[in-house]
Amino acid sequence: MEININKDIREYTEAVFFGLNLRQLICSGLAVASAVTVYFYCRNTVSQEMITYICIAVAAPFAAIGFIKYNGMPMEKIFWAWLTDNFLFPRRLTVKANNVYQKALSGYFVAKEKEALNAQEHTNNTEAG
């Protein structure tokens, strides 16, 4: 007899039915129920191939809610984090150049511009006079 023990106790999930936990079981049931409902509602009006795609599209969100985890968060927490990050509290990125070289030589650049202006005025005065 062998007993499997998870190395990380936080990853333990209690299996309710067919190895699924309660969350996965409920979401699987909702996915199947929604797909069956869509099938019976559309079977006389839409082609069989199109019904298949519609049923998959309707059942997929329920399956995602039950089975997908990202960074240990269930789907609704992932959606809430995405919503708050992008819409409720968006970050405004501002780029400010921190050019240390330009700051250190700013006096030099100003002096060079003055010299260039003086030289240009000198050439203009010699040509005019």
Image: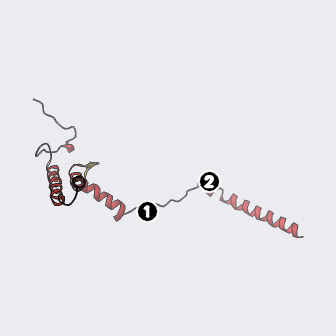
- Residue 22 image point, x, y percent: 13, 50
Q: Nearer the viewer, residue 93 or 99?
A: 93
Quadrant location, the C terminus: bottom right
Q: Nearer the viewer, residue 31 or 121?
A: 31
Residue at mark 2:
101
Q: Determine the CA span between mark 1 and mark 2.
A: 27 Å
- The disc at residue 92 is 1
Disc 2 residue type?
Tyr
Disc 1 residue type?
Arg
- Residue 88 image point, x, y percent: 34, 65
Residue that appears at 58% across and 55% down: 99
Give the number of marks: 2
The image shows residue 25, relative to residue 85, as above or below, that is above
Depth check, mark 1 against mark 2: the one in front is: 1
Specify whether 93 is left or right of 59.
Answer: right
Q: Residues within 10 Å of mark 2 (few under 14, many from 20)?
A: few
- The disc at residue 25 is none
- Residue 106 image point, x, y percent: 65, 59
Whether pointer 1 and pointer 2 mark residues with C-beta atoms closer than 8 Å, the reply is: no
Find residue 114 and report its image quarter. bottom right
Specify whether 105 is left or right of 48.
Answer: right
Secondary structure under the numbered disc 2 in the rendered image: helix
Specify whether 17 is left or right of 110.
Answer: left
Spot the residue most to the right.
129
Q: Residues within 10 Å of mark 1 (few under 14, many from 20)?
A: few
Secondary structure under the numbered disc 1 in the rendered image: loop
Residue that appears at 15% across and 47% down: 21
